[in-house]
Image (cartoon, rainbow, N blue to C red):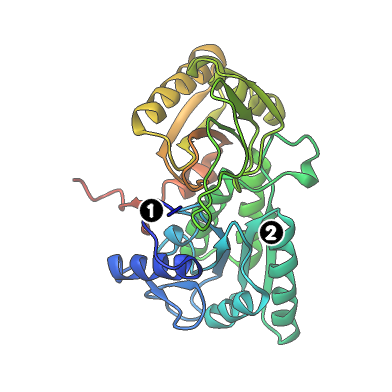
Amino acid sequence: MAIKKLVNEPDRIVRDMLEGMELAFPEIIRLDPQWNNVYRRYRKPNYKVALLSGGGSGHEPAFAGYVGYGMLDAVCAGYVYTAPTVPQVYAAIKEIATDAGIWVFFGNYTGDLMNFVPAIEMARGEGIKIDYIAVNDDVAISEKEKRRGTTIHIMVHKIAGAAAEEGYTFEEVGRVARKVIDNGRDIGVALTPSTMPTTGKPTFELPEDEIEFGIGVHGEPGIRRMKVIPSRELAKLMIDKIAEDLKLQKGDEIALIVQGTGGTPYMEKFIFYRDARKYVEETLGLKVYVSWVGEFITSLDMQGGRIAILKLDDELKRLLTAPATTIAIKIPPPNIVS
């Protein structure tokens, strides 16, 4: 049976996608001629700390969508739900190496650790100043060291990217990235599984009247299965788990990030955001400083949603709202009025 997807040969899915991105946004990114690596189009060598990220494909706009001014300098795109290879990561490191150093950010997943870290060690052996942080913000998992990297991964890209653009030192960029992880949490739910574009098969089975609570971003099931409930009740369950873990207090300022998982209509995303916003403000007494609503790290065509909260201080507020020009995130300078 034919797979009803807008794809060509299965082994070219990632390359075809990246070529399309470069053709559509040549002013922002350029594609490596050999590797599935995406680089910032215009960079001044050695003028700032460089940032590298990446992971499996299927999470678009993550990760290539965040390459550009004010965010990442390079991304390594692996195959669907698969970590990029060691040689691929090493090639990207060599391409963007600067005297100021390189920070590498990836999700806290076994495959990413296995492939990013050896490449980083190889670069260190050649005298390149480089370090990494494995993002672990998924509050569905109780043990912090085992938590997966989800939406806060993107907040690290934005805030560390702004810090690097401002001229923060290598140590300061690492500090602010860790501050984001310390103050951010995420949790997701699936209404349907994701479908692998190579086989047309779902990543798990889910009855029509049930949802998966606490999912990752690779199509894996959640921590428990439950009956479908209204959006407002689901938002409360998810936010309570985040608020408890972050120990949020009345009056805290936050960034509220509400997104779909790839196949969720915008009608539902905005209903979900409305319910989340009303609960954090009217019941918990939190102050929403900035909101992101959309698709930031997805799971192919999965229907569902994720909620993330980042507790803010003055430094994080400034860096989160600093200018950026990427495929997915465009924040103009404050003196530009549309």
For the point 51% across and 69% down, the residue is 11
Q: Which residue extends farthest top?
A: 283
Look at mark 2 in the image and give the residue it sits on: 133
Res 31 quadrant in image: bottom left
Callout 1 amino acid: Ala
Image vertical order of residue 133 relative to residue 305, above or below: below
Q: 1 left or right of 149?
A: left
**Marks 1 and 2, the one that precedes in the sequence:** 2
SS class, disc 2: strand
SS class, disc 1: loop
Q: 316 left or right of 104?
A: left
Quadrant in which the C terminus appears? top left
Callout 2 amino acid: Ile
Front residue of this view, candidates 86 and 74: 86
Label 1–label 2 contact, CB within 8 A: no
Look at mark 1 in the image and give the residue it sits on: 328
User: What is the CA distance from the residue labelled 1 to the residue labelled 2?
Assistant: 22 Å
Q: Return the x and y of residue 280 as percentages of the image width and height.
A: 52, 20
Q: Which residue extends farthest bottom?
A: 126
Q: 318 left or right of 237?
A: left
Instruction: Identify the mark at residue 311; answer none if there is no mark.
Output: none
Q: How many marks?
A: 2
